[in-house]
Image: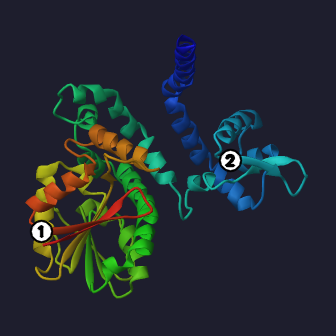
Amino acid sequence: MEETQREATWQEEEEQAEVAIWKYAFGFIEMAVVKCAIELGIADAIESHGSPMALSELSSALACAPSPLYRIMRFLMHRGIFKEELTTAHGSLGYAQTALSRRLRRHGERSMAALILLESSPVMLAPWHSLSARVLGNETSPFDATHGKDVWSYAAENPAHSQLINEAMACDARLAVPAMIHDFPEVFDGLGSLVDVGGGNGTTLQTLVKAFPWLRGINFDLPHVVSVATESIGVEHVGGDMFLSVPKADAVCLKSVLHDWGDKECIQILKKCREAIPEEKGKVIIVEAVIQEAETDKLTDVRLALDMIMMAHTNTGKERTFKEWGFVLGKAGFCRYIVKPIRAVQSVIEAFP
């Protein structure tokens, strides 16, 4: 009886492995097909139509042949990205939006299209082929090894890629910042000014200033980044280098910046932020992933995947645990910090001198 049970367990594990290994073999296909859907504008077309679309209607709207589009839609529906519903015009089945497909709209409020287009771009995909070399001791990142320079130098020399990065960071900000405002608005109580270090095109500050009109926002990033940022009320764009100095304000915000750097660089950046805030009432607001090693939640896989991205695309960057955040903050002179989970991949870390 025991032998039979062991054999049944072995058989079940083998069947599970059979399914899983094919997913790894063809894992890139999901990214490629989702990228195709974004580039074709499938979700945008259905949203603009306002109701489910028959294949003929969708192919006409996208100016593409019905047969390959049908195969793309069959693949996406099988993964629950789109669904079938009755069309209002003909009473036949058509393609309809889901909560997931709406994330593929180019300009939707909760769109992730820009981030997907960045990570699926040839520039960002090529370094993954050198990941094992990094693990085996190559001191430079796979990105450096592939492109001959780090990701920031590459972006400075390639405006189109720089724009991809800025748009991707903006779509992430449109998810994380509203969650921060909703869950912990008190973080901004008593602040008159806020500098966002590495703020890109200013999306984070635009959202915060709209929610807290008394805030004076300073969007601080590299000169080539802020030079193309859109002007907005309540936000001043300032170019500079965070390793040299940070504009003075009541508080400093660092969203998805410190994970790009190793401990040494993080401590240096945090010290410059500490110099920029008032000694008694100032604080630094960090919006970053926190890896919880002892427990998991629905977004743990995302945080661990982000850590792999840091390994592939930066020289020393990584996602940090509670203990690792405590180390860099302590070394930078912050005697107290509070970690506040929000309904996003990131948490909010308030750090006080």
Name the quarter where the N terminus is drawn.
top right
Is residue 258 shown left or right of residue 274? right
Residue 345, located in which quarter of the rendered image? bottom left
Query: SS of the residue at dot 1?
Result: loop
Tell me which colouring the rendered structure shows: rainbow
The amino acid type, in three-letter code, at marker 2 is Phe
Q: Farthest residue toward the top?
A: 3
Q: Which residue is mark 2?
A: 82
Badge 1 amino acid: Cys
Residue drawn 68% across the image and 38% down it: 78
Q: Residue at x 64, y 46 (%)?
A: 81
The answer to whether one can see residue 231 in this image is no
265 vs 341, left or right, is left
The answer to whether residue 15 is above or below residue 38 is above
Q: Tally the numbered discs.
A: 2
Foreground: 60 or 309?
A: 309
Separation of disc 1 and disc 2 at Cα? 49 Å
